[in-house]
Image (tube, helix red, strand yellow):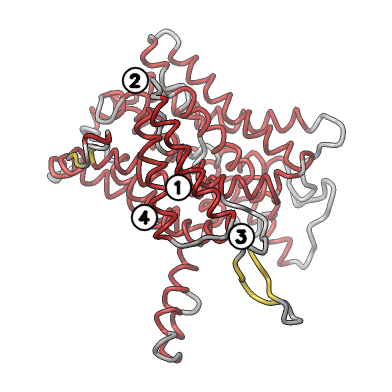
């Protein structure tokens, strides 16, 4: 926390602000989100497989909320449908920023990571289907489970092992993960909606439109925007579409470009002129902390707590083709889909990898993209239902596959990081056009 340790030197009215700023900066670090997810997952697994199992499951399954609004949900469902909507709101903000002012605005720049994301979604799904083809239609419902990349875990791995890796590699991963999230959101909305109630869906357009008009006019008052967001979320939930889609839609409504009405001053230039951010960047900055520190860890805590049942239970899970299909999809499908698709697309005229990235770097990153935690667990719950035997096997498959993919990817990138570090230590600059360190 860069500023917190100096708070005692500040006036009393500034010290709390400095402490909060230090906490805010810490929570925005790539490694922190991954660490919180690891802690939440480990705690859930310990509680679910010890004497506290009954207490853990009873807390997860207790229900509360107004039945008339279709909101009498379990604690686990509130975490998946409610808190995770915050995560998807941040995803929606980041997606819009990328499409309006970021890397996805330029089709030529975005072509490679977009194609890689599509390959990284399609190949794991195909592998899962092939593994479960003779099992029956019930197992095939989980075809999309290994298709998602967990951006928090993946970026955290690169942050830990890849200090000297080319910055373009992290950019490639971030762009790929953003597109991956967009595809995952579309899959959830299209394939995991059993029925649609059109009246509440139409009514959801009202608070959503009011929200859009207000943010376009620069309104930032939480006591106005949050109730509108909650109304939109509740109505979309009542419509039968997964409520996390509401978070994405709300994020898409926020303006990216700073205008006279909708902007936030973030500093000044050397000449003293004010520097402004659009509201999308402002909201993403604020809500990413809530997503990282609260929403995603709580979801992980209530979703990852699978009762393994000792060695015999673990062996039983690994004999289920659902778990095997997920593991194969994450560990094999993701790196094959990303690497092969990228290779094929770079055969097209004018499309090349960034000169600082070697193919072995891309392979390591593709394995890291096989960490499919948050959205994979969510799709698993949508596919088989919370607490079912298949859902437990899904969790084992997701955790095992993500761990294996992360270990392989981290090992490759750590080795590459040592090569780049030696080059930096020797005082050499990173060569271009295929001359990166081998």
Query: What kind of element bears circle 4?
Result: helix
In the picture of the structure, the residue carrying the numbered disc 4 is 294
In the picture of the structure, the residue carrying the numbered disc 2 is 320
Q: Where is residue 207 in the image (x, y as percent from the top left)?
A: 45, 44
Task: Please tell me whether residue 157 is drawn above or below residue 333 in the rendered image.
Answer: below
Instruction: Give the number of the mark in front: 1 or 2.
Output: 1
Q: In which quarter of the image is residue 280?
A: bottom right
* Residue drawn at point x = 59 percent, y = 33 percent: 335
Q: Point out the tag, 3 or 4, that comes first from the N-terminus.
A: 3
Residue 163: give its label: 3
Q: Position of residue 70 (x, y in %)?
A: 27, 33
Binning the other alpha carbons within 10 Å of mark 3 as few (below 14), some (14 to 19) or many (20 upward) gives some
Q: Which of 132 and 419 is in front in this view?
A: 132
In the picture of the structure, the residue carrying the numbered disc 1 is 87
Find out whether the residues at labels 1 and 3 contact each other: C-beta distance under 8 Å.
Answer: no
Query: What kind of element bears circle 2?
Result: loop
């Amino acid at each position: 926390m860069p500023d917190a340790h100096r708070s005692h030197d500040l006036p009393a009215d500034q010290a709390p602000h400095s402490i909060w700023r230090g906490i805010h900066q810490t929570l925005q670090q790539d490694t922190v989100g991954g660490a919180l997810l690891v802690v939440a997952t480990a705690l859930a697994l310990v509680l679910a497989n010890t004497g506290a199992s009954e207490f853990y499951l009873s807390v997860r399954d207790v229900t509360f909320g107004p039945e008339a609004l279709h909101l009498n949900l379990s604690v686990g469902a509130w975490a998946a449908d409610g808190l995770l909507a915050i995560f998807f709101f941040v995803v929606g903000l980041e997606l819009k920023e990328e499409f309006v002012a970021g890397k996805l605005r330029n089709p030529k720049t975005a072509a490679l990571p977009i194609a890689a994301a599509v390959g990284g979604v399609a190949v794991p799904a195909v592998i899962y289907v092939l593994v479960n083809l003779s099992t029956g239609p019930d197992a095939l419902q989980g075809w999309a489970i290994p298709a998602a990349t967990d951006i928090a875990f993946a970026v955290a791995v690169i942050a830990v092992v890849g200090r000297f890796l080319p910055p373009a590699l992290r950019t490639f991963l971030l762009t790929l993960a953003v597109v991956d999230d967009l595809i995952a959101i579309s899959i959830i909305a299209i394939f995991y909606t059993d029925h649609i109630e059109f009246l509440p869906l139409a009514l959801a357009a009202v608070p959503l439109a009011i929200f859009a008009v207000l943010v376009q006019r620069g309104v930032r008052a939480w006591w106005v925007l949050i109730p509108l967001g909650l109304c939109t979320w509740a109505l979309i939930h009542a419509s039968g579409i997964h409520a996390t889609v509401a978070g994405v839609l709300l994020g898409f409504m926020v303006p990216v470009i700073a205008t006279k009405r909708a902007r936030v001053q973030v500093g000044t230039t050397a000449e003293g002129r004010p520097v402004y951010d659009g509201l999308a960047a402002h909201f993403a900055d604020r809500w990413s902390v809530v997503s990282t520190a609260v929403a995603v860890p709580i979801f992980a805590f209530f979703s990852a707590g699978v009762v393994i049942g000792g060695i015999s239970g673990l062996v039983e899970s690994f004999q289920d083709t659902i778990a095997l299909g997920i593991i194969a999809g994450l560990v094999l499908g993701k790196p094959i889909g990303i690497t092969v698709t990228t290779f094929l697309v770079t055969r097209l005229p004018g499309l090349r990898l960034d000169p600082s990235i070697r193919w072995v770097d891309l392979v390591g990153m593709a394995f890291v993209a096989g960490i499919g935690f948050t959205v994979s667990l969510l799709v698993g719950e949508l596919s088989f239902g919370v607490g079912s035997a298949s859902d437990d096997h899904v969790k084992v498959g997701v955790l095992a596959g993500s761990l294996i993919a992360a270990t392989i990817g981290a090992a490759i990138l750590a080795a590459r990081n040592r090569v780049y570090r030696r080059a930096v230590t020797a005082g050499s600059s990173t060569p271009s056009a295929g001359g990166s360190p081998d």
